[in-house]
Amino acid sequence: MQTLEDFARKELKVLEEENRLWPEHVLESPTSNWSIVDGREVLMLCSNDYLGLANNREIKQFAIQAIRAYGAGSGAVRVISGTMSLHKQLEAELAEYKNAEDAVTFQSGFVANFGTLSATLGEGDLAISDELNHGSIIDGLRITKVERRVYKHNDLDSLAQMLEGSKKYNKVMIITDAVFSMEGDIAPLPGIAKLAEEYGAMTYVDDAHGEGVLGKLGRGAVNHFGLEGKVDVEMGTFSKAFGSVGGYVVSGKEFCKMLRNKVRPYLLSGSQPPAVTAANLAAIRYVQRHPELFDKLWKNTKYFKEKLKKLGFDTGKSETPITPIMIGDSKKAQDLAKALFNEGVFTIPIVYPMVPKDKARIRTIINAKHSLSDLDFALERLENVGKKMNII
């Protein structure tokens, strides 16, 4: 009989042979433009900290005050004694920020998707999902008895075909990322909303990478397209542009009340600690007072993309600060990341199964705190390494 260690060794061998082992880098300082990783100072070019809030002094101070006032943890799940006034305040201000009726917060974005979808859809329902949707969406649907259809990435014609004959189901839900985390492109939400209305389907938008990036004061992709009130469920995270951790769903009051009483991770997991909840609340308040962050984020993004393309790098179809450098071969993508790290630039290779086997890439992410000299430093190293490796 196979032992657990034998099983693990075989799995690791396969991953190594397929160049799918993730290198574990250790962050030894706050995440910032320049951080200490594996004992050396490097330019951070792979963090999701779009607005540079993870080490923001005001947000940290609010978190520290919350620990002093409320302690280290709540000691329970939300539905027992784990709902603090901070949680209610965060959800109220989040709903107002998102121009929604109500909001529910979760321990992570993965939990928000996994729990909400598994609690909402089941036998007799139909889920229609973009082929490049996040794994938390895929897993949330996988554990249910819902019928699943997958449409071609961002293809409205393919989506329309999947909607044909859908009126026989109890509920039909179209599910899409708003900004796709590996591609950096944006879903055609106006067209999706129009098809949903035409066929009587519900819409679910995962805006994890759109929050704090798109829309007025970072309200997200739905706000960006002027679709508030036309999307049934918006999911987002605090772990990216807001610099902290956690997930949330905004929707109607009745739906949110149902989630609080039905989502198993919400019912059975300890509530977010006071420091995290306070940091999330402070971040929402902060971004609304600092519109210059969004201007800088997009100025940096435009500069970096244009320079990369002039150097000859393939950035795919990216429309956002997520800027992939398409390589193709997994080993070559890993080698490029190692070479860049040795030159002082921290990036991460994205390989199968996160992307198709022939679509490996380096994913770079620009933030509002990068200076032009930071970006020029990265571009110079990319040019040097890219030429040595015959990528450009």
Image (cartoon, rainbow, N blue to C red):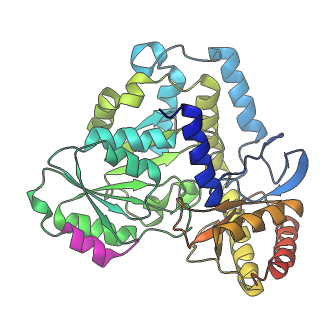
Magenta residues span 153-163
Judge from the rendering whether residue 31 lies leftward or rightward of residue 282; answer left or right.
Answer: right
Identify the image quadrant of residue 38.
Answer: top right
Judge from the rendering whether residue 11 lies leftward or rightward of residue 122; answer left or right.
Answer: right
Identify the image quadrant of residue 175.
Answer: bottom left
Magenta stretch encompasses residue 155:
yes
On screen, residue 132 above or below 272: below
Residue 327: image location, x then y, percent:
66, 75
- Compare residues 229 and 319 and report the one nearer the observer: 319
On screen, residue 95 above or below 299: above
Residue 380: image location, x then y, percent:
87, 75
- Compare residues 191 and 365 and report the one nearer the observer: 365
Judge from the rendering whether residue 293 lies leftward or rightward of residue 98; answer left or right.
Answer: right
On screen, residue 103 above or below 310: above
Number of numbered callouts drawn: 0
Which image quarter holds the C terminus? bottom right
Please tell me which residue is depicted at 65% across the width and 17% down the height of the picture: 72
Q: Magenta stretch: dominant SS?
A: helix
- The reply to whether residue 199 is visible in this rendering is yes
- The reply to whether residue 100 is visible in this rendering is no
Identify the image quadrant of residue 63.
Answer: top right
